[in-house]
Amino acid sequence: MHEQPSQVNHADCHPRTATCPEGTCCVRVVDLRKSFGRLEVLKGVTIEFERGKTTVVLGPSGCGKSVMLKHIVALLRPDGGEVWFNGRRMDALRGQALGQARREIGFLFQQGALFDSITVFDNVAFPLREHGWTDQRAITERVKQVLDQVGLTHTIKQWPTDLSGGQRKRVALARAIALEPSLVLYDEPTTGLDPIRSDIINELINKLKESLGITSIVVTHDLQSAFKVADWLVMLHEGQVRLQGPPDSFWISRDPIVQRFLRGEATPEELSAIWPTGGPRTMGTVFENKP
Ligand SMILES: Nc1ncnc2c1ncn2[C@@H]1O[C@H](COP(=O)(O)OP(=O)(O)OP(=O)(O)O)[C@@H](O)[C@H]1O
Ligand SMILES: [Mg+2]
């Protein structure tokens, strides 16, 4: 799979499921639809996530990226469509079978979601205990091992509130990989971090892929991070796939919506609320005005 970039028209976004045999495809969402009340968030999203690769999902705020991730772990149930993970229909699983499937997935939540009232050790040990680990020595060994993988063994006795934002993300990542997942979902892993700390997270994502063969799905609007980690890029726009393909295909796309997103440029309509007279377009951008 992943041989051809697919430039998708807003109006006719077609599934590519036939190209993804079970062995190479870790996750597949097919014609996924979800609304909250009258708000239609996902309007038929089809994406294949290749095993052992990093797929980055880009898109403007509110386009449904987190909602899509939550469907993969069945924290949300679709109104229509299918969600497959390693040959199982996640949207149909319940009870023990769902618990077992989730055990194979690490989720780095958008807000980090560390428990501030327990130490770093207990945060990372949490999923192990939740899944029945009782041998204290084995727990300690595993916690040290994953903290070592994110370069934070020295924080083991600290409280999350004493850590920097970047360290908190890395502890959350250690917790997400504690159960040796085959799939890790990252929701905005670099948001709020400075460029150096973002780069450390990017390297960690790449390291987990190279050393453990982990499949990653990274949701972000941090373009630098996206292009550093992506084997395959997908852009969501207004609840549909706008474009997907290898990273290079995005730079050559002539789709104005993709181009504007890459340039970080709002439309005149989007700006009209703050510049009713069209001010900034006549003033040029910071870069254009540079001496
Ligand atoms: N549980 C929910 N109940 C009602 N509305 C929801 C719920 N979850 C998400 N939404 C709405 O769905 C839309 C998409 O939300 P989502 O969190 O997926 O956006 P996103 O693409 O991840 O944005 P961001 O980049 O800002 O994180 C938003 O309008 C949000 O308010
Ligand atoms: Mg989100």
Image (tube, rainbow, N blue to C red):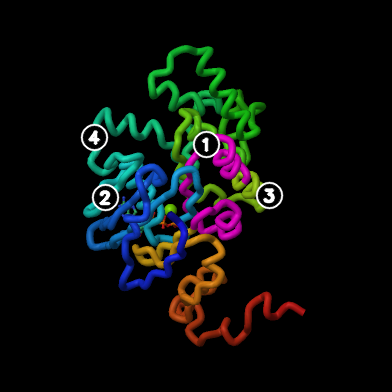
Q: CA distance from mark 4 to mark 3?
A: 41 Å
Element under label 1? helix
Upstream in sequence: badge 1 or badge 3: 1
Label 4 CB, ligand 1: below 8 Å?
A: no
Q: Dot 4 lies on which element?
A: loop
**Distance between mark 4 and mark 2 Cα atoms:** 15 Å
Badge 1 or badge 4: first in the primary sequence: 4
The quarter of the displayed image where residue 210 is located = top right
Residue, disc 3: 196
| Location of mark 1 (residue) | 172
Query: Residue 264: x and y, percent?
Result: 55, 69
Numbered range of the magenta stretch: 203-232
**Pointer 2 local density, CA inside 10 Å: few below 14, some 14–19, many at least 20:** many
Distance between the Cα atoms at labels 2 and 3? 38 Å
Is 110 in the magenta? Answer: no
Q: Nearer the viewer, mark 4 or mark 3?
A: 4
Residue 155 can be seen, yes or no: yes
Would residue 196 appear left or right of 24 to someone viewing this image? right
Mark 1 / mark 2, whichever is N-terminal: 2
The mark closer to the camera, 1 or 4, is 4
